[in-house]
Image (cartoon, rainbow, N blue to C red):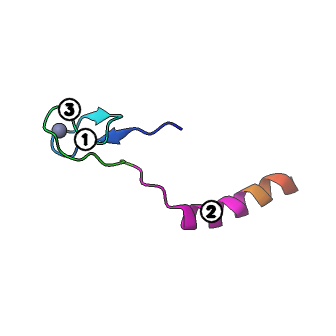
Amino acid sequence: MFKMRKCLKCHRYTFKEFCSVCGSRTISPHPPRFSLNDKYGKYRRKMLYDE
Ligand SMILES: [Zn+2]
C-alpha cells in the first residue's frame, strides 16, 4: 500500500515514520477515516453497480 507521510516541521514528504532531517515523527497528510469513508464508499459502490 502506498503510504506517503509528511514532516510537519520541514514540510518534507517521506515514507519513513520519522523525518530523516529533523527526527520528528511524520504524519499521514490524508489520514484514513474508514468509518466515514466506508459509509459513503458503500453508497458510491451501490450507485455504480446499479447503473
Ligand atoms: Zn523534519
Mark 1 in CB contact with mark 3 (< 8 angstroms): yes
Q: Which residue is drawn at 71% across and 62% down?
A: 42
Q: Mark 3 points at which residue?
A: 20
Magenta segment boundaries in residue numbering = 30-44
Q: From the top left corner, tell me how far across and down residue 34 is, in percent.
A: 55, 61
10 Å neighbourhood of mark 3: few (<14), some, or many (≥20)?
A: few
Camera-side mark, 2 or 1: 1
Q: Residue at x 30, y 34 (%)?
A: 13
Residue 14's quadrant in the figure?
top left
Q: Would the CB of label 2 be found within 8 Å of ligand 1? A: no
C-alpha gap between disc 2 and disc 1:
29 Å
Q: From the top left corner, tell me how far across and down residue 25 is, in percent.
A: 23, 47
Left or right of 34 on screen, residue 44 = right
Give amino acid for label 1.
Phe
Quadrant location, the N terminus: top right
10 Å neighbourhood of mark 2: few (<14), some, or many (≥20)?
A: few
10 Å neighbourhood of mark 1: few (<14), some, or many (≥20)?
A: some
**Could you say whether the residue bearing mark 2 is in a helix, strand or loop?**
helix
For residue 48, above or below residue 42:
above
Residue 15 lies in the magenta-colored region: no
Q: Mark 2 points at which residue?
A: 38
Q: Which residue is drawn at 35% across and 41% down?
A: 5
Q: From the top left corner, tell me how far across and down residue 3 is, in percent.
A: 44, 39
Give amino acid for label 3.
Ser
Q: From the top left corner, tell me how far across and down residue 19 is, in percent.
A: 22, 37
Q: Mark 1 points at which residue?
A: 18
Left or right of 32 on screen, residue 19 = left
Mark 2 in CB contact with mark 3 (< 8 angstroms): no
Q: Would the CB of label 3 be found within 8 Å of ligand 1? A: yes
